[in-house]
Image (cartoon, rainbow, N blue to C red):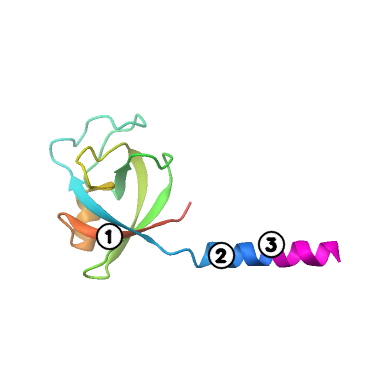
Amino acid sequence: MLLHRLAVRAALACLVLSVTPARSEIASWYGPGFHGRLTANGERFDQNALTAAHRSLRFGTRVRVTNTATGRSVVVRINDRGPFVGGRSIDLSRAAAGAIGCGTCRVALVVLG
């Protein structure tokens, strides 16, 4: 009986995790002025790579970023800290922003791991 209850709880936990809604955030982009400079994790910033800056996600975390206006999405890797402009939660590289058609836009973020 105990194993059955544990199995049910585990199944419910998996279900909840699989249907957790994406968070709606404001994204912006950065590029030319930072290209080649060191990011917070110590690598060189490449504005043509699919990377992003986030204030709290771990370095190396992959995030699906979807422009809510167009439905276009891109998967980025967090390698920097920012943005440092109020009201924004993620700064995309120039390439990532271009992939979803975003200058400053509302996006849905899904952490992939």
Calculate the distance from the C-alpha at mark 2 to the C-alpha at mark 3.
10 Å
As drawn, the label of residue 78 is none
Is residue 79 depicted above or below 16 in this figure? Answer: above
Does dot 3 land on a helix, a strand or a loop? helix
Residue 30's x, y, as percent?
18, 43
- Residue 105 relative to residue 13: left or right: left
- Return the residue nearer the eye: 67 or 36: 67
Disc 1 is placed on an element classified as strand
Residue 7, percent from left and from top: 75, 65
- Packing grade of label 1 (10 A; few <14, some 14-19, many >=20) is many
If you read the primary sequence from the N terminus, does the residue marked by circle 1 or circle 2 appear first? Answer: 2
Q: What is the distance, in whole Å, between disc 1 and disc 2 at their CAs?
A: 22 Å
Asked if residue 112 lies left or right of residue 79, the reply is right
Dots 3 and 1: beta carbons under 8 Å? no
Is residue 62 positioned above or below 44 on the image?
Answer: below
Give amino acid for label 1: Val
Report the amino acid beneath label 2: Val
Q: Which residue is mark 3?
A: 10
Q: Which residue does the image show at 19% across and 58% down from the upper left?
A: 105
Q: Which residues are magenta?
A: 1-10
Q: Which residue is mark 2?
A: 16
Considering only vertical position in the picture, is 18 above or below 32? below
Instruction: Tell me residue 110's x, y (percent).
Output: 40, 58
Tag 1 residue = 107
